[in-house]
Amino acid sequence: MIRLLLVDDLVIFRAGLAALISLEPDIEVVGEASNGEEAILFAETLRPDVILMDVRMPICNGVEATKVIHQKFPWIRIMVLTTFDEDEYICQSLQNGALGYILKSTPSQQLATTIRSLDRGFGQLDPAIALKVFSRIPKQTTTQSSALAVLENLNPNEIEILRRIGQGKNNREIALDLHLTEGTVKNYVTNILTCLNLRDRLQIALWVSHNLGDTIDS
């Protein structure tokens, strides 16, 4: 059962969403928060698997709440669900640890599928949001030949970490897979970002998908 926390300051929207999602046999809404401050508290007390987080809220917004929750509980998957598609919200949310960003216009059935994917560790972006994120990936890394050339600057551990980020795994899961400390993984990720000239781990995942496909699995 996927334990879900809903965070939105609109009570009517929250209640309607909770009612729809509760129809799914494998998803349980364990709590509802009306602002980021409550979201941080509920994340600690309820320990949900997934959080659907709005961005514009009173007291503490979703961007800041995402940062705090991700730092304290990095295993909780956070998905931004909002009506706002401004670049600033997108970039800050993803940099702060959100695993994806979708709009409230997403059909409820598709939203349920997204929650399941998120619980398995796969990032999700609304198509319109994905275009914005892809546009920020440096153009010099858009061909497979140049992408493979970049891999030559990475050591074997970094290549393994790159592959696992492409699979949607977080630092803790990667550390367990490769028998490394989380601190070591974090250092490797920093070097990968530098080598690929990217900003955050979601861009790494998109870079892997866009440039390498199955190549990196070989």
Image (cartoon, rainbow, N blue to C red):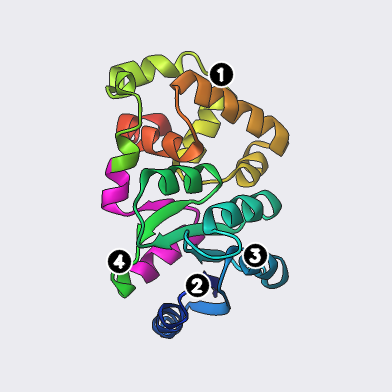
State the CA–CA distance, disc 2 to disc 3.
11 Å
Whether residue 180 is visible to the viewer of this picture, yes or no, is no
**Crowd around label 3: few <14 · some 14–19 · many ≥20 (10 Å):** some
The correct choice, above or below, for 111 with respect to 96 in the image is below
State the CA–CA distance, disc 2 to disc 1.
46 Å
Q: Is residue 175 magenta?
A: no
Tell me if 86 is positioned left or right of 55 in this view: left
Q: Between label 2 and label 4, give the one nearer the viewer.
A: 2
State the CA–CA distance, disc 3 to disc 4.
26 Å
Query: Residue 135's image quarter?
Result: top left
Q: Write down the residue under mark 3.
A: 37
- Which quadrant does the C terminus fall into? top left
The correct choice, above or below, for 16 with respect to 62 in the image is below
Q: Write down the residue under mark 2.
A: 9
Q: Is residue 114 magenta?
A: yes
Start-end of magenta stretch: 111-131
Tell me the residue at 48%/77% (across/down).
Answer: 26
Tell me the residue at 39%/82% (across/down).
Answer: 20
Q: Earlier in the sequence, mark 3 or mark 4?
A: 3
